[in-house]
Image: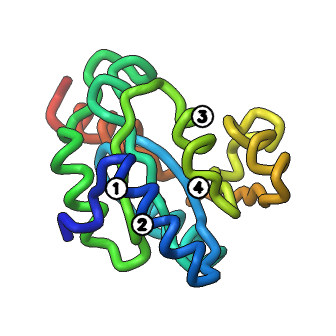
Amino acid sequence: MRSKILKLSDLVKAIEGLRKAGKRIVFTNGCFDILHVGHVRYLAAARSKGDALVLGLNSDASVKSIKPDNRPIVSQDQRAEVLAGLVCVDYITIFDEPDPLALIQTIKPDVLIKGADWEEAKIIGSDVVKSYGGNVVRIEVVPGISTSRIIQRILKLYGR
């Protein structure tokens, strides 16, 4: 499983090999703080759009910059290892920036995936991917399921 978790330089080499073999590269990103059914369905659907799914995982520092103070709940190394256990995820790379734009520019995926709760015009990197003929795909999210809601439910159950 750890062989799926790559530094960006190693990921670029792996993607070059896939491209030479004619494979279609799919990219998505996120925090995936507490893995839940919405994440699993989303990632499986993303993988179905190509031959290899590359996941850009927000580092702990990145999560802290874009989420409430109590996040992440699970460390980046643990989140990466859990995600690497999913058969639908081919590669994971961890990034420190608040958004994946530099990663998208480097990887140049054939397909950029984001949840349907994002307007296409607001999906970071969509203009980049479209500029070289790639596609942007929005995947339906599972209603009522999110890491934030899970955290709220736990806090409510335990009186906080």
Q: Amino acid at mark 2?
A: Ala
- Observer-nearest residue: 147 or 138? 138
Which mark is in front, 2 or 3?
2
Q: Which numbered circle lies on residue 101?
A: 3
Give the residue number, with chain letter if any, for mark 4.
143
Is residue 65 shown above or below 12?
Answer: above
Q: Position of residue 48 (x, y in %)?
A: 60, 79
Give the residue number, with chain letter if any, for mark 1.
10
| Secondary element type, mark 1 | helix
Verify CB contact (< 8 Å) between mark 4 and mark 1: no
Verify CB contact (< 8 Å) between mark 2 and mark 1: yes
Q: Position of residue 149 (x, y in %)?
A: 40, 40
Q: Amino acid at mark 3?
A: Leu
**Distance from the alpha carbon under mark 2 to that under mark 1:** 6 Å
Where is the N terminus found, in terms of image quarters? Answer: bottom left
Q: Which numbered circle lies on residue 14?
A: 2
